[in-house]
Amino acid sequence: MASSISADSAAAPPPRNGIIVTAAAYEAAVDELIGLARSKLQVFDIDLSGGGWNSAARADNVAAFLRRTPHAHLDLIVHDTRWIEQSCPRLLALLKSHSHAMTLYRTGPEARSAMDPLVIADGRHFLHRFHVDHARAALAIEQAQEAKPLVARFDEIWATGEPGLGGSVLGL
């Protein structure tokens, strides 16, 4: 029965670090992390307006992640949900259809000064954008030790969170 395990879930990618310097490379890195995630994705951003979150391909990648395992979960926290409400119908549809596996929070006042978006997959792969105004970011694959401070930072931001949008957004 060992042969029933898929190759991509059994083999970990080789560890690597890199610097991202363009918006297109940043979007590709987000998709790479979504593809690597097996159980948990944590995303902090200002409003998700950068990084391709409104694309059909991104919605498909997120949906595939959420179907990957029964316990897959996506935690999103943003400063402002307006852009998501106005420009991300696919992401909102996923939030509605996978409300058991997705949480969208808005940052509390204590975290509103944070301006360095994060995407963390399974606590061992991450993409850390140094400032929202610049595409420059650090990408690390299979770097659990390096990810620990960023996981802690995400948890601190998450702890300030207030309900953002739920699966039953009415658009009122």
Image (cartoon, grey):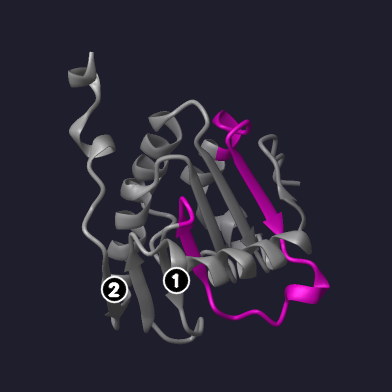
> What's the residue at 31%, 47% (across, down)?
35
User: In which image quadrant can residue 168 be found?
Assistant: top right
Q: Nearer the viewer, residue 124 or 163?
A: 124
Q: Which amino acid type corresponds to the residue marked 2 in the rendered image?
A: Asn
> What's the residue at 34%, 71% (across, down)?
139
> What's the residue at 47%, 84% (across, down)?
130
Left or right of 148 in this view: 104: right
Q: Position of residue 19 (x, y in %)?
A: 30, 80
Decide: is 77 above or below 6.
Answer: below
Q: Nearer the viewer, residue 23 or 172?
A: 23
- In the picture, the disc for residue 17 is 2
User: In which image quadrant can residue 105 be found?
Assistant: bottom right
- Secondary structure found at label 1: helix
State the residue lying farthest toward the top. Answer: 1
User: In which image quadrant can residue 171 be found?
Assistant: top right
Residue segment shown in magenta = 95-123
> What's the residue at 43%, 55% (across, down)?
54
Q: Which amino acid type corresponds to the residue marked 1 in the rendered image?
A: Glu
